[in-house]
Amino acid sequence: MGKKNVTLITQSSYIIVNNGLVRLTISKPQGLLTGIKYGGINNLLDLKSNELNRGYWDINWSLPGGQDRYQLLRGSEYSVINFSNDHLEVSFKNTYDPSTPGTRLPLTIDHRYIVRSGVSGFYCYSICERPPHSPAFDLAQMRMVFKLQRERFHYMAITDEKQRIMPVPEDLLPGRGKQLIVPESVLLINPINPDLKGEVDDKYQYSMDSKDGGVHGWISSNPIVGFWIMFPSQEFRSGGPTKQNLTVHTGPACLAMFHGSHYIGNDMIAHFEEGETWRKVFGPFFVYLNATTDVSKAYYLWLDAKNQRLKEESLWPYGFISSLHYLPHSERGSATGRLFVQDRFVSTSLIPAKSAFIGLSAARTEGSWQTESKDYQFWVQTDSDGNFTIKNVIPGEYGLHGWVPGFIGDFLKEEPVTISPGSETQLGDITYIPPRDGPTLWEIGFPDRTANGFYVPDVNPMYVNKLFVNSPEKFRQYGLWDRYTDIHPKSDQVFTVGVNDPKKDWFFAHVDRRNGDNYIPSTWEIRFNLISVIKGTYKLRLAIASATRSDLQVHVNQMNAEGIVFQVMNLGDDNVVCRHGIHGLYQLLSVDISSTFMDNGDNCIFLTQARGGDALCGILYDYIRLEAPPT
């Protein structure tokens, strides 16, 4: 049988789109997805939810200095953008008029759906625009949410390793679940599926870095159907490759996250000034549907979804999008070059930047790509020789950013990079000189912008999630902050350079120590030996993988006013400790230490997390290095 034509039925309050494989029902003019028929299931979406709360776009925003506002995004104008036998694109638009009185979201929103003949799924994207004379506002989060049938969808998959049968919504209610000190965390005490008893459910346990994601979803039983969200590109998602986003959670919910502050904090909020114009296309992303009648082949739905995601990536940018604001391949450009590292204390020659992350962003200061939240970003990894080609870049002027595993700090090319339509910008050889004053006396950890190289404890058996037992992501377990006190109940961590092993003896999170019902500041000691003190300034490099509400103090050899060499208050708000992460907003702190603080022989640096009374505050170090004075 050949492909079936795409059909469109228009009713007074909804439309029905059908391509022979998938049938969508969309409210008109709101543009909310109320039904998806596929694979023998009349509606994949949650029948117990209100029709207008099943497949929807939403936003968190505020007026400057005002309270957070949550809003479901609905259209007020429906139109057919493009319609043929094999293609349909429809629009649901809400136009903002600055002259209309009242407090309203100062954005024009145009949600689009695309259905194509022979394609087992559909495409979604949104065009957001601020017209001239719009008032100031702050954008905190934007996403699309799909609530699936809770009676059918119980198995989720994010990666090859992260797949499991999930709880059901009723398990999170009192009597079946017990809310823990983190509001999103629930201990399953009497779940409907007894195999899940004693586990913790928390949506943040299923977060993924943008660079590692691309496809996630659910598989239903009876019939066996897969529902998958696919990102063919990450260019329209805020925060660059290391930004962590939610994927799935008990509901069953499947999320397409575009912008949000999770794992970064308020620095991620996009602030728009009064009168500032702006336009951005979020997406398209692809909702892929597949099915099998053989229960023994259910896992192949995941493998098929992974392969389909690669196909979608190869087709990017899509050639079938009708908006003038979405640029096809012919209207984009590229940049190519080779990145080296120059560190004379590591090598007298330039070092090819192997597996470095390098990208183009509107950010103009070192490392600020992490919090860039208004424009597009384009990232790749270099090959073993440091070569890179960044393809399909929207024309404009960018900062060239990068970071290299094994070296601290952020690279930023001095001159901006201009990308022109249909051309390749030759950048040639580029050299990154990481922060360095003198030779390394000692180092703790490996600089990869995470706390992965340190000791992550086993979970308290009371709060286990079996998915992360014997997993490379042990840090995803609930309550690991309290394991620090279990290991160090009376006194704090002491690490002796040359004796202790960071992977065994350096706790991954510098948190408060539990003392009865209270949490008290903790001080970690780094003990080391100097054969002889060199006159001058020593440099302590503290690469921070994450920080939350922390007051960090650094003392040398004396824990008093005379010994303090550095202090920073209220460091970070990325909430990584309670959200089971291993990194958040990367920061590099460089501390000058006069040689007058040092002694011949034994020395000690004290790192104090000085804010007490907070179980969930803390610092995750990426890497620590002490450099001798330059010679």
Image (tube, rainbow, N blue to C red):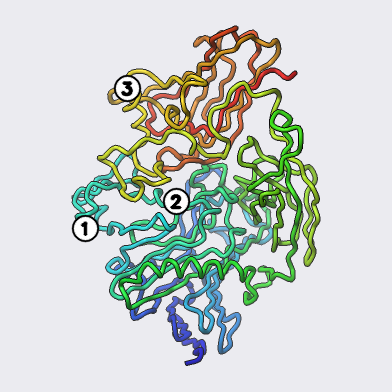
Q: Position of residue 493 (x, y in %)?
A: 42, 22
Dots 3, 2 in contact, CB < 8 A:
no
Residue 83, picture quadrant: bottom right
- Disc 3 versus disc 2: distance between alpha carbons? 31 Å
Most extreme residue toward the bottom is: 1
Counting residues from the start of the chain, the first of labels 3 and 1 encountered is: 1
Dot 3 crowding, Cα within 10 Å, few <14, some 14–19, many 20+: few
> Closer to the camera, 292 or 476?
292
Amino acid type for the residue under numbered disc 1 = Asn
The residue that mark 1 highlights is 193
Counting residues from the start of the chain, the first of labels 3 and 2 encountered is: 2
In the rendered view, would you say 494 is above or below 412?
above
In the rendered view, would you say 379 is above or below 532?
below
Which element type, helix, strand or loop, lies under badge 3? loop
Q: Seen in the image, is 553 located left or right of residue 532?
A: left
Which element type, helix, strand or loop, lies under badge 1? loop
Q: Which mark is residue 108?
A: none
Dots 3, 1 in contact, CB < 8 A:
no
Q: Residue at x 50, y 16 (%)?
A: 527
Q: Position of residue 425 (x, y in %)?
A: 80, 57
Does the rendering let one see residue 72? no
Q: Residue at x 59, y 62 (%)?
A: 233
Q: Which mark is residue 489?
A: 3
The residue that mark 2 highlights is 207
Q: Seen in the image, is 413 located left or right of residue 318?
A: right
Q: Position of residue 600 (x, y in %)?
A: 60, 7
Amino acid type for the residue under numbered disc 3 = Pro
Amino acid type for the residue under numbered disc 2 = Ser
- Disc 2 versus disc 1: distance between alpha carbons? 24 Å
Location of the C terminus by quadrant is top right
Q: Residue at x 46, y 84 (%)?
A: 18
